[in-house]
Amino acid sequence: AGADRLQTGMRGAFGKPQGKVARVNIGQIIMSVRVRDNHEAHAIEALRRSKFKFPGRQLIIVSKKWGFTKYNREDFPNMLAEGRLIPDGVMAKYISGHGPLDHWKKLQAKKAGQD
């Protein structure tokens, strides 16, 4: 009873919705921020201050991944230098050693033309 409305006292006592509410599960990510390494401390401080605006306990977790990719920060530059990754916007395409030979030749020719 009353779980679908914000606690606003007698305002809207006839069941009219007041304000905005989001249902969040335990462990669900509320915010995600991507910044350069030199701005990391500022982003953490901003998130620390913003977590007081949310009820419950909020955690700030710094990812070990490179940007929004699935590759670790330590491995990403090496994989990029070896040619196993191709930057693709905010993500990166993984180039495996399998597949058609003409596809590999096309990639090598494109890579030689860029260098």
Image (cartoon, rainbow, N blue to C red):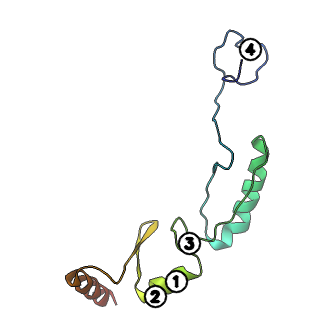
* Number of other residues with Cα within 10 Å of mark 4, as a class: few under 14, some 14 to 19, many 20 or more: few
Nearest to N terminus: mark 3 or mark 4:
4
Confirm or deny contact between disc 2 and disc 1 (CB under 8 A): yes
In 3D space, how far apart are the residues under numbered discs 3 and 2 (Cα atoms)?
Answer: 15 Å
Provide residue 91's location: percent of width, then percent of height. Answer: 45, 67
SS at circle 4: loop
Q: Amino acid at mark 1?
A: Pro
**Camera-nearest residue between 52 and 96:** 96
Confirm or deny contact between disc 3 and disc 1 (CB under 8 A): no
Q: Amino acid at mark 2?
A: Ala
Furthest residue in direction top, as rendered: 14
Residue 66: which numbered mark, if any? 3
The residue under the point 37% across, 80% down is 96
Residue 11: which numbered mark, if any? 4
Nearest to N terminus: mark 2 or mark 4:
4
In 3D space, how far apart are the residues under numbered discs 3 and 1 (Cα atoms)?
Answer: 9 Å
Provide residue 41's location: percent of width, then percent of height. Answer: 73, 67
Q: Which quarter of the picture shows residue 47?
A: bottom right
Mark 2 sits on what residue? 81
Furthest residue in direction left, as rendered: 102
Q: Which quarter of the picture shows residue 18?
A: top right
Viewed as shown, does residue 111 lie left or right of 12?
Answer: left
Mark 1 sits on what residue? 77
Foreground label between 3 and 4: 3
